[in-house]
């Protein structure tokens, strides 16, 4: 009886390892939905193009927003870091570092930033199918409904009724 139990235990252990390797690809296709994670400050190509040496810190903040990292030990630099993580796509990370001399922008360096239109296109994960119908009425489509609607005469607006309020204090 113990030999039979030992044989069953060995077979079960061997079966578990073969099931794991055989169904790993199937199990990965059944993975739960993972949300898009956007972290940091998105900086577009248009924003970087607006930077000019000599700008004040406030002007840089107006163009790029508040920096993600502003170190106490390195007060002459601001770091803008942006990370986008989506299911089925490698994480994208971009970095821009802005250097100051005193209160003036000295230089900036970092990754090549996408334009705003390119960035929005990467976020659009839904695939559009079919043709988008025109959104304006043509003369032919209006003719189906009996032509153009007759213009209604516009009546003069009535004056608002007189409003009287009771006194706030007794007389």
Image: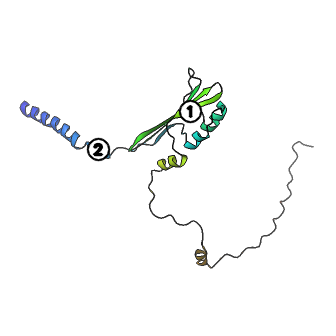
Classify residue 169 by image quadrant. Answer: top right
Q: Residue at the spot x=59%, y=41% of the render?
A: 49
**Is residue 81 something one can see in this rendering?**
no
Query: What x and y, as percent, mark residue 167?
Result: 88, 46
| Gap in angstroms between the C-alphas marked 2 and 1 | 46 Å
In the rendered structure, the answer to whether residue 152 lies left or right of residue 7 reads right
Q: Is residue 160 above or below residue 7?
A: below
What element does badge 1 sit on? strand
Q: Residue at the spot x=59%, y=24% of the render?
A: 76
Q: Residue at the spot x=17%, y=39% of the render?
A: 15
**Is residue 13 something one can see in this rendering?**
yes
Pointer 2: what residue? 27
Query: What x and y, as percent, mark residue 117?
Result: 53, 49
What element does badge 2 sit on? helix
Q: How is the image coloured?
A: rainbow
Quarter occupied by the C terminus: top right
Do residues under tags 2 and 1 come within 8 Å of each other at their CB atoms? Answer: no
Q: Residue at the spot x=27%, y=44% of the render?
A: 25
Query: What x and y, as percent, mark residue 139?
Result: 61, 75
Pointer 1: what residue? 108
Q: Nearer the viewer, mark 2 or mark 1?
A: 1
Q: Earlier in the sequence, mark 2 or mark 1?
A: 2
In the rendered structure, the answer to whether residue 104 lies left or right of residue 13 reads right
For label 2, count other residues whose C-alpha is less than 10 Å away and answer few (under 14), some (14-19) or many (20+). few
Classify residue 148 by image quadrant. Answer: bottom right
In the rendered structure, the answer to whether residue 157 lies left or right of residue 61 reads right
Residue in the foreground of this view, choosing between 3 and 170: 3
Query: What x and y, as percent, mark residue 170?
Result: 90, 43
Residue in the foreground of this view, choosing between 66 and 12: 66
Quarter occupied by the N terminus: top left
């Amino acid at each position: 009886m113990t030999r039979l139990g030992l044989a069953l235990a060995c077979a079960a252990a061997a079966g578990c390892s073969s099931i794991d390797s055989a169904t790993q690809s199937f199990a990965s296709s059944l993975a739960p939905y993972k949300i898009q994670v956007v972290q940091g400050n998105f900086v577009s190509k248009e924003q970087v193009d607006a930077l000019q040496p000599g700008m004040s810190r406030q002007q840089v903040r107006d163009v790029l927003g508040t920096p993600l990292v502003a170190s106490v030990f390195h007060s002459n630099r601001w770091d803008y870091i942006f990370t986008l993580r989506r299911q089925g796509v490698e994480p994208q990370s971009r970095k821009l570092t802005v250097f100051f001399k005193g209160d003036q922008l000295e230089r900036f360096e970092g990754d090549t930033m996408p334009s705003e239109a390119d960035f929005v296109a990467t976020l659009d994960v839904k695939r559009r199918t079919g043709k988008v119908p025109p959104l304006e009425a043509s003369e032919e489509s209006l003719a189906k409904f009996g032509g153009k609607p007759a213009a209604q005469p516009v009546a003069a607006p009535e004056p608002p009724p007189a409003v009287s309020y009771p006194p706030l204090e007794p007389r």
